Image (cartoon, rainbow, N blue to C red):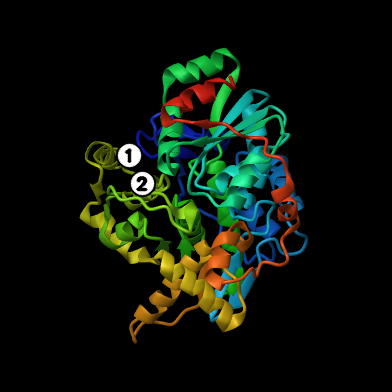
C-alpha cells in the first residue's frame, strides 16, 4: 500500500509513514486506496480483523512483523474478547477500554512499538506525544522498556482526571517521560507538530543519533490498527448500521470511516462532542471554526479545538487534492477558520452528522443509563449515548431503522470524581487490576513547563 502526504503528495511506504509520523511537508500520511481492494471478510475475532486490515494497509511490512504486532496486542488484553460488543438500553456498545490504561488508545499503542522498531531499523527513536489525558498513559505503557525508544508525553497541567494524571506520573521506566505544560492539549499538539517540522531541531537530534516520531493519531501506526475493531464490530452486527463516536482529535471516527471504505456497512457517522463542539459544528456546516472559547469539562479527552485527523478527511473529501488541503490549512493558520467547497460539503453531509452534550447532560445521561439498565458509563461514552438518543429521536418516519453502534472509549474507573458527582456515591467497587494500586504508587514524573519551554524539554532527551 502506498501512502502519500495530504499536502504535497510525498510518497512513503507504510514503514516510512510510521517512522516519520508527520510528513515532511507538514501534512499527514494517508493510504491510497485503489479500486482493487479485497472484499472485507466476515471475521470471528480481533486477530482475524487486525490481520485483514494490516494485510491490506501495511502489506509491504513483513508478515512476521504484522503477526508480532497482533500477538503483542492480544497479550496485553484479557483473554477471550478484547473488544466486546454489548447491548445496553437499545444500543450496541463497542467496549474498547479493557487494556492496561482503560482507554481505546491501548489497542493501537500495544501494536505501534512493534511497527516502530521495525521501521527504525536499529535507529534510536524519541516518540513525542501530546495528550488530553488518555494517549499519554497508553503511549507510556505501550513503549515502556522497548529497546531503542524513548517516549516524551506532554499533558495539560490542569484538566485531566486524577487517575489520568497518576497513570502518566507514576511510571518509572527509564525510557518514558511525562511533562505537564501550563496550557491545554491544543498548545501541546501545536508545539509537537511544529517541532517535527523544524529542520534545526531535527538536525540537532540527528547529530546525536536520534530520530523524532509520534505516538499521536497523526501516526499511521496509531490510525490503522483502530480500523480493526470496527471491522470486527461490523461482522458481529451483520448488516447496515449507524454509529456514534465521542470525538476529540477525530482519529477514532476516522478509523471507522476507513473501515467503511474497506467494506464495513456503516450508513452514517455521528460525531459526539462536548461543549467544545468544533467537530459537531464542522460536520453540520462544513465550516471549521475553533473560535476563542475553551472549556475544561468533565470529558477531558474531548477538550480539543484543533483536531489533527480532520486533515485526512479533507484529503478524502477533495479527491486527494493536496493543493486544496494546503489552502484550507493555510486559511486555518491565517484566519483561524476554513470553509469547504460545495462538492466537499455535500460529501461531508452525506456521511456525517453531529451532536453535543453539555456537562450537565453528561451527568444526567450517566445516571439515566445506570437507572435504565445498570450500565455505568464513563463521561465520554455518556456524551456519545446522549447524542445517539438525540439522533434516534431525530430520525424521520421514512428513514430505515438501523442498529446504532456507540463506541465506548474509556472505563468509568478513569473518572471516579465525575462518577461520584453523577451518582452521588461511589459505584466503582471492582477496579481493573492496573487501577488497584495506582493511588499508592510513588509519583516519578514531576516536571512542569511553560509552553515556551517545550522545545528545551525535548532537546534534553537527545
Q: Nearer the viewer, residue 420 or 59?
A: 420
Residues under numbered marks 1 and 2 in contact, where contact means CB atoms less than 8 Å apart:
yes
Q: Is residue 238 above or below residue 252?
A: below
In the image, residue 400 lies at what x, y percent? 41, 82
Residue 66 numbered tag: none
Quadrant where the C terminus sits is: top right
The residue at 38%/50% (across/down) is 313
* Residue beneath disc 2: 315
Q: Secondary structure at mark 1?
A: helix
Describe residue 270's horizontal placement relative to residue 457 as left or right: left
The residue at 75%/51% (across/down) is 437
Q: Is residue 319 visible?
A: yes
Q: Nearer the viewer, residue 283 or 274?
A: 274
Q: Secondary structure at mark 2?
A: helix
Describe residue 352's horizontal placement relative to residue 335 as left or right: right
Describe residue 321's horizontal placement relative to residue 402 as left or right: left
User: Which residue in the rendered view is the most extreme toward the bottom?
Assistant: 397
**Quadrant of the rendered image containing residue 308:** top left
* Residue beneath disc 1: 322
Q: Nearer the viewer, residue 139 or 113?
A: 139
In the image, residue 194 lies at what x, y percent? 41, 29
N-terminal-most mark, 1 or 2: 2
Crowd band around label 2 with a 10 angstrom C-alpha radius: few (<14), some (14–19), many (20+): many
In the image, residue 24 lies at what x, y percent? 43, 28
In the image, residue 95 lies at what x, y percent? 61, 65
**Quadrant of the rendered image containing residue 332:** top left
Amino acid at each position: 500500500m502506498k501512502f502519500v502526504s495530504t499536502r504535497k503528495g510525498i510518497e512513503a511506504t507504510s514503514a516510512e509513514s510510521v517512522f516519520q509520523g508527520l510528513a515532511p511537508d507538514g501534512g499527514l500520511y494517508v493510504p491510497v486506496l485503489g479500486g482493487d481492494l479485497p472484499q472485507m471478510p466476515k471475521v470471528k475475532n480481533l486477530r482475524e480483523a487486525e490481520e485483514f486490515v494490516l494485510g491490506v494497509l501495511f502489506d509491504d511490512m513483513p508478515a512476521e512483523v504484522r503477526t508480532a504486532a497482533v500477538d503483542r496486542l492480544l497479550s496485553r488484553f484479557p483473554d477471550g474478547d478484547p473488544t466486546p460488543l454489548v447491548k445496553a438500553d437499545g444500543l450496541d456498545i463497542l467496549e474498547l477500554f479493557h487494556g492496561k490504561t482503560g482507554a481505546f488508545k491501548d489497542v493501537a499503542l500495544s501494536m505501534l512499538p512493534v511497527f516502530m522498531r521495525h521501521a527504525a531499523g536499529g535507529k534510536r527513536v524519541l516518540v513525542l506525544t501530546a495528550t488530553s489525558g488518555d494517549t499519554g498513559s497508553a503511549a507510556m505503557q505501550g513503549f515502556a522498556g522497548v529497546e531503542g525508544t524513548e517516549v516524551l508525553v506532554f499533558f495539560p497541567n490542569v484538566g485531566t482526571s486524577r487517575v489520568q494524571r497518576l497513570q502518566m506520573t507514576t511510571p518509572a521506566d527509564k525510557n518514558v517521560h511525562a511533562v505537564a505544560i501550563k496550557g491545554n492539549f491544543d498548545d501541546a499538539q501545536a508545539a509537537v507538530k511544529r517541532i517535527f517540522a523544524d529542520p534545526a531541531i531535527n538536525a540537532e537530534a540527528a547529530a546525536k543519533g536520534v530520530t523524532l516520531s509520534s505516538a499521536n493519531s497523526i501516526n499511521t501506526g496509531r490510525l490503522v490498527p483502530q480500523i480493526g475493531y470496527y471491522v470486527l464490530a461490523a461482522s458481529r452486527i451483520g448488516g447496515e448500521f449507524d454509529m456514534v463516536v465521542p470525538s476529540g482529535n477525530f482519529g477514532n471516527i476516522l478509523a471507522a470511516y476507513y473501515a467503511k471504505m474497506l467494506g464495513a456497512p456503516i450508513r452514517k457517522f455521528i460525531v459526539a462532542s462536548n461543549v467544545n463542539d468544533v467537530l459537531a459544528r464542522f460536520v453540520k456546516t462544513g465550516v471549521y471554526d475553533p473560535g476563542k472559547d475553551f472549556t475544561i469539562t468533565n470529558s477531558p479527552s474531548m477538550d480539543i479545538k484543533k483536531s489533527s485527523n480532520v486533515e485526512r478527511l479533507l484529503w478524502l473529501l477533495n479527491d486527494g487534492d493536496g493543493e486544496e488541503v494546503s489552502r484550507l490549512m493555510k486559511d486555518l493558520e491565517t484566519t483561524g477558520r476554513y470553509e469547504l467547497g460545495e462538492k466537499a460539503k455535500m460529501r461531508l453531509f452525506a456521511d456525517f452528522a453531529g451532536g453535543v452534550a453539555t456537562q450537565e447532560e453528561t451527568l444526567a445521561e450517566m445516571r439515566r443509563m445506570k437507572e435504565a439498565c445498570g450500565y455505568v458509563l464513563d463521561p465520554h461514552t455518556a456524551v456519545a449515548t446522549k447524542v445517539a438518543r438525540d439522533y434516534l429521536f431525530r430520525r424521520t418516519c421514512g428513514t430505515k431503522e438501523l442498529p446504532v453502534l456507540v463506541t465506548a472509549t474509556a472505563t468509568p474507573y478513569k473518572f471516579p470524581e465525575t462518577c461520584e458527582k453523577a451518582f452521588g456515591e461511589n459505584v466503582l467497587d471492582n477496579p481493573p487490576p492496573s487501577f488497584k494500586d495506582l493511588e499508592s504508587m510513588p509519583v516519578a514524573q514531576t516536571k512542569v513547563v511553560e509552553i515556551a519551554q517545550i522545545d528545551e524539554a525535548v532537546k534534553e532527551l537527545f
